Image (tube, rainbow, N blue to C red):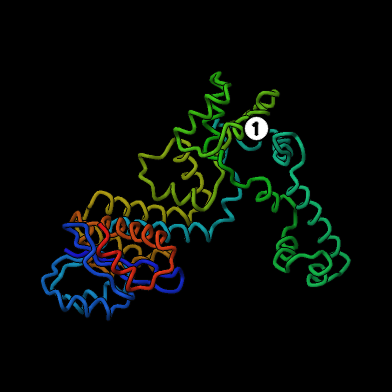
Amino acid sequence: MLGVDEFAVRRGRTCATILIDMSTHRPVDVLADRAANTFASWLRNYPDVRIICRDRAGSFRDGAQAGAPQARQAADAWHLLHNLTEAVERVVGRHRTDLRERLGSHDGRSKDDQPQEVSGRAELDVHGRPRPLASRTRERHQQIHERIERGDGLRAIARDLHLSRATVNRFARAAEVDELLVAAINRPTLIDDYRLHLHHRWMEGCTNASALTSEIQRLGYRGDVNTVRRHLKPYRSGAIPATAPSPHLTVRRVTDWIVRRPEHLTDVERKGLKELCERNPALETPAEYARRLALMVRDRRSEHLALDVWIADVRLDGQRELRTLANGMRRDYAAIQAALTTTYTSGAVEGNVTRIKLLKRQMYGRANFDLLRRRILLTP
């Protein structure tokens, strides 16, 4: 049983191929490139290869078919989920304008019931000072629209204000400055994912910043206590938000909501995804297709032609990015079917690629390929 993957000899310039004996997890050879012909030529010298574990690279697929037609190819489940995540991320990215609008509050109040001064407070930092980016955005919007009303061209405005044409076009298209302030005052920070937790814990009576920091660090927070203190400063001054803060929507966050197991979503995340799909129905169908495929891969489900039905459905009415993924899966059908019906993975291969990176760092990247190959094969 053979594992195969590529690694960078020179980042962005040269890639080589590592071949792993999956029973011992040890490298058996290193090829100088990742071409299909090179891999096929190597396989012809080893007719006893029966299983080939790989990612979904086309060169390894074609090389295995040409050099070892007797071998069964097995795609790696992690790489398949990674391909799905990339496709969903591109779908969500095409609808990123719908992410600028904040989700509804989580206490049942409508947007009309929320105080109008919320947006004004959002333009202030934790110390009550105007955010420089928000102030600069308002100033530039006013300058550009005043020049446009005088009849100045966009090229001249960009030259006089020392801005790019793309920036001037973006400000010119925005009739109201609020369209631009959404991005200026809602930039993601380390604490965004934990605002709701901090809000609820504060309302429960826990006001110790150190204790709250320890709680959210166990949930994955990577910042320090000072960031939490700055976030809680308005709470201590009496400016407690009337509604629980909603999650800051980004392309990656929404993609994570779609691809993650539904039972692992919190109530807030589940409600936010439902509201987003209701706001933009174009995201509802890709989300459903993504969940179906992710469930098949994670649970190794292939009964009742589930994969064939999924590919047919996506090719019929899926969005462009998912159709591209489905077409690639159709060409790689046998390997993906093996990923759904067997437990073969490329984990040992990925571990050896990490080991190669360590060897390269020990050599300061100054060795030629022959020496690097010998170290890969002979280092215990």
Residue 243, given in percent of the width and then of the height, sits at 60, 30
In the image, taking residue 193 as reference, residue 69 lies left or right, namely left
Residue 31, given in percent of the width and then of the height, sits at 29, 73
Kindly tell me whether residue 53 is visible in this rendering.
no
Q: Quadrant of residue 168?
A: bottom right
Q: Quadrant of residue 167?
A: bottom right
Task: Tell which residue pokes out farthest to the left in this image.
Answer: 48
Residue 295, given in percent of the width and then of the height, sits at 30, 50
In the image, taking residue 102 as reference, residue 37 lies left or right, namely left
Q: Measured along the vertical axis of the image, is residue 169 above or below residue 187?
A: below
Task: Tell which residue pokes out farthest to the top in this image.
Answer: 205
Foreground of the two, 165 or 303 = 165
Q: Secondary structure at mark 1?
A: helix
For the N terminus, the image quarter is bottom left
The amino acid pointed to by label 1 is Arg
Residue 280, given in percent of the width and then of the height, sits at 52, 53
Q: Residues within 10 Å of mark 1 (few under 14, many from 20)?
A: some
Task: Tell which residue pokes out farthest to the right in this image.
Answer: 150
Seen at 61% across and 35% down, the residue is 227
Foreground of the two, 343 or 23 = 23
Seen at 82% across and 67% down, the residue is 157
Seen at 67% across and 45% down, the residue is 185
Q: How many marks?
A: 1
Seen at 13% across and 73% down, the residue is 70
Residue indicated by mark 1: 230
Foreground of the two, 101 or 232 = 232
Kindly tell me whether residue 360 is visible in this rendering.
yes
For the C terminus, the image quarter is bottom left
